[in-house]
Amino acid sequence: MDIRSFLYPKDEVSYLTTSSNMKESLDKLEACHYTAVPILDENGVYFGTLSEGDLLWKMKTTPGLTFENMHEVPITSINKRMKIECVTIGADLDEMLTLAADQNFVPVVDNERVFLGIIRRKDIIEYYTRNITD
């Protein structure tokens, strides 16, 4: 078994681009019901992950920031409180499992860091629940 077996492909994943703003990111998170989404640059390269908590802390620490003007804030200016690590598609399964233990999902990239999709911790748990016997 390899990482590809767990891949939830990019075309089925909600993500943001580095040109997105804070309002767009909040709308995306609300629409997809995720607590965090990957961010890709204009070439599809994995840039990082933005979480609801990142948005909340930005609101709390930015005087004068409101729902009415949050469209002026680029997401690249928002501090990410957690660094979500990615793996390459050819990575060892153990490497992916180690990351999945601490992250709700693991972004998967190619050798040039182009985003291919995610591996959801939920899918890993379901797989092992179905297939592991004592």
Image: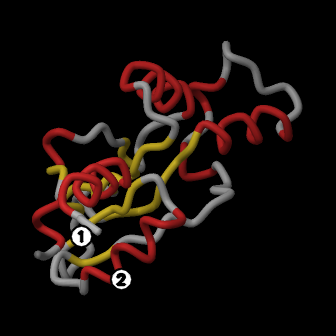
Picture quadrant where residue 37 is located: top left
**87 relative position to 90: left or right:** right
Quadrant (top left/top right/bottom left/bottom right) for the N terminus: bottom left
> Counting residues from the N terminus, which is met first, the one under dot 2 or under dot 1?
2
Q: Position of residue 33 (x, y in %)?
A: 43, 25
Of labels 2 and 1, the one closer to you: 2
Question: What amino acid is at disc 1?
Answer: Val
Q: Quadrant of residue 51?
A: top right
Alpha carbon distance from label 2 to label 1: 14 Å
Write down the residue under mark 1: 109
Q: Residues within 10 Å of mark 1 (few under 14, many from 20)?
A: many
Q: Identify which amino acid the numbered label 2 is placed on.
A: Glu
- Is 103 left, or right, of 42 in this rendering? right
Residue sticking out furthest to the front: 134
- Where, by quadrant of the figure, is residue 60 drawn? top right
- Judged from this view, the residue extending furthest toward the top is 68
* Residue 101, horizontal then vertical, whole percent: 49, 66
Q: Image point 44% across, 77% down: which residue?
A: 98
Q: Determine whether the residue tagged by mark 2 lies in a helix, strand or loop.
A: helix
The residue that mark 2 highlights is 95
Residue at (83, 37) in percent of width and height? 62
Q: Residue at x 28, y 49 (%)?
A: 126
Q: Secondary structure at mark 1?
A: strand
Q: Is residue 17 above or below residue 42?
A: above
Q: Position of residue 90 (x, y in %)?
A: 16, 83
Q: Residue at x 29, y 54 (%)?
A: 129
Q: Is residue 82 left or right of residue 41?
A: right
